[in-house]
Image: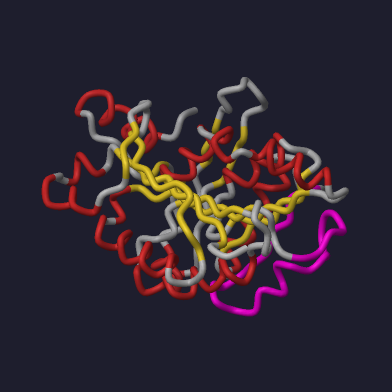
Amino acid sequence: MPNPEDVLAESLETLYDYVPVALSSSGSTFTYQPGNAGDAITLTTPDTQAANWSLHATSIWSSSIYIADHLCDLGLDRHVAQARAENRPLRLLELGAGAGLPSILIAKTYQDMLVTTSDYPDKSLIRTLAENVKRNKVFDRCRVIPYSWGSDASVLLSCEGPGSATGKFDVVIAADTLWNSELHGVFVESLGLTLRRSPEARIYLVAGLHTGRYVLQSFLRLIQGAGFVAEKLVERRVGGSEQRPWSVERAEHEDERERRRWVVWMVFKWANC
């Protein structure tokens, strides 16, 4: 039976053009059907301990669904081919994974890839994330690691768990992780600690515009001052094909309803590599 909250969200979007920024609620079941008619992904929406409610990890955020819907735009086939030419598996990391939708879909789609899915070390959150990985039968190539941004990244880089490759990651992804500007510094630090020093290595970030343009602009200044350069920085319409360049100046001329219709698609690489 569909989740009543999801039905309500879909009704609001259909009747009032009100795009939801998150679906489901803690403890609810969420089902995602890939567009390629592959196996459905069934997730339990995480809960957190009371002390960590501020993480906002108890929903399936629209940006994670957007990544899942646009998996081909990550260019993973190209990344896999590059790693294969070097006779090694591709290593991918998701930060702030929540329920783990992008990580799990990627692990199901690319069976020769080693995926690490991570989030804050909250026992309830990590337990649910691990259960989602197991339920969707990708535990042999997708490991779950609790990780607090800005802390020692060796736990992410080790060889424990599925696969045997060690080292930094070829691809790092994250969805809706930029809403709290106080965490931008440690988030960018974690990107620097985990991304492989290679011209081909990439960071793919997606953030809903409900995050706020000025908050996003603050993040962009920080990450580009930390040794990264934006390869792509565009606004994409949710549920459509419209795309436009990023602009902080639109903040003065849009309301909440308009912001909900857009996500920002960001691709970063090392500036000097």
Can residue 25 be seen by looking at this rendering? Answer: no
Q: Is residue 260 left or right of residue 272?
A: left
Across and down, in percent, residue 47 comes to 50, 58
Residue 162 part of the magenta-drawn span = yes
Q: Which residue is drawn at 57% across and 63% down?
A: 119
Residue 138 image-quadrant placement: top right
Q: What residue is shown at x 64% (from left), y 53% (from top)?
A: 171
Horizontal and vertical percent position of residue 269: 55, 57
Is 61 inside the magenta-drawn segment?
A: no
Q: For this rendering, which residue is in front, 126 or 176?
A: 176
244 to the left or right of 68: left
Q: Is residue 24 left or right of residue 108?
A: left
Magenta span: predominant SS is loop
Q: Quadrant of residue 242?
A: top left
For the residue pair 22 and 175, the one nearer the viewer reads as 175
> Which residue is located at x 56 percent, y 46 percent?
44
Determine the image quadrant of residue 62: top left
The answer to whether residue 167 is above or below residue 268 is below
Q: Relative to residue 223, is residue 176 depicted above or below?
A: above
Question: Depth check: 252 or 102 in front?
Answer: 252
Residue 85 point in image, percent of width and height: 83, 44
Q: Total marks drawn?
A: 0
Can residue 33 be seen in the rendering of this structure? yes
Left or right: residue 16 compared with residue 186: left
Q: In which quarter of the image is the C terminus?
A: bottom right
Name the spot of residue 5 as percent of width and height, x first: 37, 38
Extreme left residue here? 253
Q: From which residue to which does the magenta span run?
A: 141-167
Q: Which color scheme did the rendering employ for the protein?
A: secondary structure
